[in-house]
Image: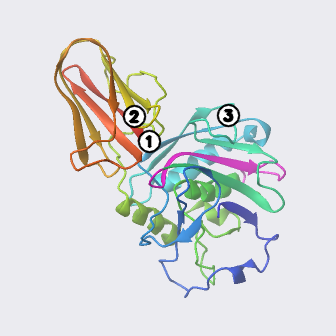
Amino acid sequence: MNKLHRASVVAGASSLWIAMVVGNAAAFRLIQNTFVGRVTSGSAVACTDPGGFAHWANSNIAWSYNPASQGGKPGTAAALQSAMASWTNVPSANNVLSLTGTTTAGFATDGQNTIHWGTGEGCSGGCLALTALVLVAGQVIVEADVTMNDAFTWNTNGSDIDVQSVATHELGHTLGIHHTDKNGGVRRRPTMYASYFGIEARSLESDDMMAIQCSQSRYPPLATWGAPAPALAGSLEPLASGSDRVALSSRPRPGGGALIRFRLTTGGATRVELYDVAGREIETLIDGDRAAGEYELAWDGSSSSGPARSGIYFARITTPAGFARASVILTR
């Protein structure tokens, strides 16, 4: 589902896709895969499919790119930033994709969202690029990586193969969007068309925009938090805006559940709350005075409405000194 091919390699392949009425603006499809872990494939489903689809729980998604190989060509960073801006600027959607810098990371599960150029990573022949998603229970995306096939010649000047066009397409996959079922006809093809068709893919069509709008309407992300989706592995880096006096982190609990740690440099009234991915408060773990120090809580999945399912949740700590937040992955 997430390989972008050169049109010349798949000439005539449009017959493999469902023919849609020209002008049909609801041909987009979302990626459905209930596997927990790293995936590079999935079923193409409608937004209303009862089985759901892959989605982010938070709207702020930070990316890095690896400047090795063709990733170091002039204009690459600007091309990637423009690709991210296309998805960030969709009306009635609040996802924010940002390029934070470079990395030495590659196409691997490591807690980083990475774009890099490589070969021999499942993308060969006519494949231009491949996306991998890391999923937790509930089809929640906690990491995404893109490998651009270094066997092709990449350009940022508008000639083939165009970095921005392909990156825009692959970033759609990282948001949980499958290939569209809409064929080009006499009108412009959506960016999420299955094969490469040049620089026109840099800009989104209505079919592309409706995909992310519908995804977010079904799974509203927690835009105001901006916490990284993967749980922090024991780190107590401060997450409070403008404050280094309170910090929060979480990691899976051996045998099931989750461990939540927090640090207070000044004591006072302290409240630790848990929320689900829709932003609903499900439990209050602490509500009272605490002295300065470091604390660790064991959460077994209990909530005000009964046992919580395995999946991703969010913790928030509020104190007179400031606030912090972190992702919490609950295992059973």
Q: Does the magenta stretch include residue 150?
A: yes
What secondary structure is marked by label 1?
loop
Marks 3 and 2: which is nearer the front? 2
User: Is residue 58 in view?
Assistant: no
Q: Tell me the amino acid under the disc marked 2.
A: Ala
Instruction: Check whether the beta carbons of the residues at disc 2 and disc 1 lie within 8 A of each other.
Output: yes
Q: Distance between the residues labelled 3 and 1?
A: 27 Å
Front position among marks 3 and 1: 1
> Type of residue at label 1?
Thr
Local secondary structure at mark 2: strand
**Mark 3 or mark 2: which comes first in sequence?**
3
Q: Is residue 228 left or right of residue 11?
A: left
Residue under pointer 2: 258
Tell me if 304 is positioned left or right of 161 in this view. Answer: left
Q: Which mark is residue 331?
A: 1
Mark 3 residue crowding within 10 angstroms, few (<14) / some (14–19) / many (20+):
some
Is 200 magenta? The answer is no
Q: Residues within 10 Å of mark 1 (few under 14, many from 20)?
A: many
The Cα atoms of the two marked residues, 3 and 2, are separated by 28 Å
> Residue at point 41% right, 45% down?
312
Q: Residue at image x 44%, y 72%?
A: 49
Examine the image and state in which quarter residue 19 appears.
bottom right
* Mark positioned earlier in the residue sequence (3 or 1): 3
Which residue is disc 3 drawn over? Answer: 105
Highlighted range, magenta: 137-158
Q: Nearer the viewer, residue 231 or 243?
A: 231
Using the image, determine if residue 275 lies above or below residue 102. below
